[in-house]
Amino acid sequence: MSKIYKHRDSIIKRDKKDFINGIHDFSEEDIIGLTEQEFEEIQKCCMRMNLTGVDEFFDFLLTEGIDALNKSEIEYSKENLLISRFYLTIFLKFHCIYDKDYARTACYLGDVNRELADLGVEPEINLKQSIELYQEIRRMFQGKNPEYIAATTNLGINYVILADFGIEPEQNLKESIKLQEEARHLSLEDSSKYLVVTLNLGLTHLTLAQLGIEPEINLIKTINLCQEIRKATSETSMDYTKATLNYGFALILLADLGIETEKNLEVAIKLQIEARKNLPKKSLDFGRTLMNEGRAYFGLAELGINTKKNLEEAIKLLREARKNLPKMCLDYAGSSICLGYALIGESIHQGVNSEKNINEAIETLKDAQKILPKTSLDTGSAFINLGVAHRILAILGIEPEKNLEECIKLQQKAIEILPMDRLNYAKAILNKASAYEELANNDVKSEKNFQLAEELYKEGINIFLEAKDGWNYPVAVLSIYNLYRNIFWRSGDKSILEKSNNALREAKKNIEGWEVLRKNIILGELYSVEADFHELEEDYYKAGLKYRDAYKLTKKEYYRFMCDFCGAKVESSKKEEKHFCRLVDRWKEIDKKGIFLDFYDYAIFECYLEEALENEALRFDEVTKAISKLDEIYVRTSIYHIKIRVSACIEILNAYLNYFPKRDNQKNEEKAKENISSACRIFQNQGYKHEIDLCNQFIKAIKNKERQEVWLDLIKNQLSNNFSKLIREAAFDEITKLHTRGIKADLGEIKTGIKEIKINIDNLTISLKSGISEELVISVGAEFAGTGAKHEIHIPLQKITYPEIKKDLENIKSENIIKLTSLPAKLATKIREYLVENEKDELLKYSN
């Protein structure tokens, strides 16, 4: 404050020299440390002082202001911008002649104010001042004047930022395009200005696309403008570099629309790397390239391409981007949202550090919320993703009711912010519906919450239907179909199935009449879901016809296989023929993966049962082969429900082998009863009512000393038939995932990773082993594939250390065999994390 008082004295004394010396005396630290009130005081002092004949002082002010502004291009920071603002503002206060120097400086200061707004420094005030400066220049000059052109294009950029802040976005962006087009027309004779205006025009179209306004058209316009700049400039120029950055980002957004997704993401990565080579490491654009590249890798992971590797790369780049970007700028908020997305994605796909990742995601999304304007569209998106994160915590079993209710609140906040005609508004509606459905599935006011979910899904469907959105409309339809499916499984009410079938028929009819991208793929998926409907009704003939229709549209081999598969199911009642063995033979040379491979392996399982039924002498060997095939499915699948039921099926088939061994003297009735009891426990723990009834039939078969044929009939016609339905359920989840880009697509999969880990771990025995370095020894109680061998895992204590570990270990020291669920909570969590991080949970697959 002493320097400001000194200026006041200079004003009172009218001492020009003393005043000028006082300005020279301000250090960078003094300027950066000024409050807004103090800076206003200095400006008032300037207005009361008349300075003439001090051209050298004016040159000093202009040089210092421009130098600081140039530094901010290299090292994007609030400090450089505050210094620039200080000198440029003082210049304008004294330079009262409205000439080109005034206009040029006003343009610089407008840039500074805009950048400060972008950094979160009094954004509304700085943006308003920036707009007023550009408008003043436009009033001073007209036509092809360079100052007028510069002010026009910069004013256009400000309208883009207003849109980013959520202030009348569509209107401001249209005004921006009008200004940019005017500036582009006026600058035709000046190639350097023309390129700058072209770059800014591309940015405006890019922002329109981000707002969901004719996204594909606006993105293609952006790409064309960026390519125009790249062709007209050298690869080392800044215009070329910025065009490359924006070009890559536009491709990422095109990929988000489902247009040549993999190709566009791969090209986008190359473009971001190319742009980064020419950028200073501490510049804003350098941070943006890291953010965009991270987002592209996440997109590839979402496609299932090198999922683990691409997720890790995405998270690394996005964390690096956050370190490079100023903490209060909109791009920092953007990178925070993307990182939250990727962390949730890693939890969904890998089950790695799930709770830790989700909590980090929540913190990064909260960081974004602090920066974003309260009513901006990006804030609405942040609320959506934050709600999704809470929903995943619920699915992880962490305070499910509380987290689902928090998800509903956050989706409602998004709904209140977002315009009703925006895509994200409808997404918030669907996410809110999903949370209500999840509450109902958890037996929280089931009837009411199912009803609320149904109403919201219908609202989302109507929004997409009215917009003729061929990409998101089917997602909403699949969501309500899944809801009806869940209600049917819980109630057994077949009238619910008719509702679901009506929704599918209407969706198919609407899509057929629309001009939409990838129409045949979407319709193919809808046909396959109709097949699922017929399979629920056990009408495999009609299901096969729907798969045939899906294949005709898409030429996907999976659909053709499923048509044949349903045919085998129809014909399998004819015992004189081995329909599944023929199916297996016909398809053995075709490449298969994912759910396709699961169904093929199931067909092999059925083939072994067919062989067992036909040849009594080979029954033991064929059933042993069937168990081996189930083992393969168990190891490979990441679908929780498949893993559970496969393990129970293995127990039942082992019961068969123990009850009907190769030699009568090896018969072990007690062991067979244990196998059946183990299967029953698995089914009971999961609430599988039909399978519990089936277990009772096997127990009855032992009690009544039934023949092999009775056992095989139960295995073939009931156990394996239910298993087929189960794989179909997983296939339906895959279909739903294909449509929904982003986090919501994979929420169902989180159950796989986490519940699977709980099953694997909760059946362990744990002991503390002392020695040179203390270890925890974890043993799986079950034998491995009947060999008598047991798995052990040794965990060095330093790998799971935490402050209270000594106390927790002391409490278990006297114990030798402990359930993981009986351990202190922190110790149990650390053991889980170690096993998952080191990919050792797969060793435990037979523990249940």
Image (cartoon, grey):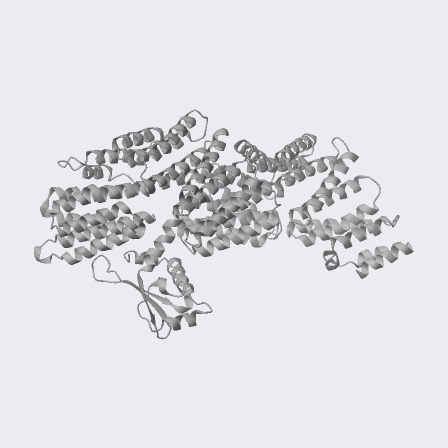
581 is higher (above) or lower (below) than 511: below
659 is higher (above) or lower (below) than 810: above
Q: Which image quarter is the C terminus in?
A: bottom left
Residue 145 vs residue 332, the one in the foreground: 332
Residue 740: image location, x then y, percent: 44, 39
The quadrant in which residue 614 appears is top left
Residue 25: tell me if it is visible: yes
Image-based side of 71 in relation to 318, left or right: right
Residue 185: image location, x then y, percent: 68, 29
Residue 531 vs residue 485, the one in the foreground: 485
Taking the view exactly as shown, the residue that stands out farthest to the right is 13
Residue at 52% in and 51% down: 318
Image-based side of 369 in relation to 401, left or right: right
Residue 551: image location, x then y, percent: 32, 31
Residue 710 vs residue 140, the one in the foreground: 710
Residue 262 vs residue 226, the one in the foreground: 262
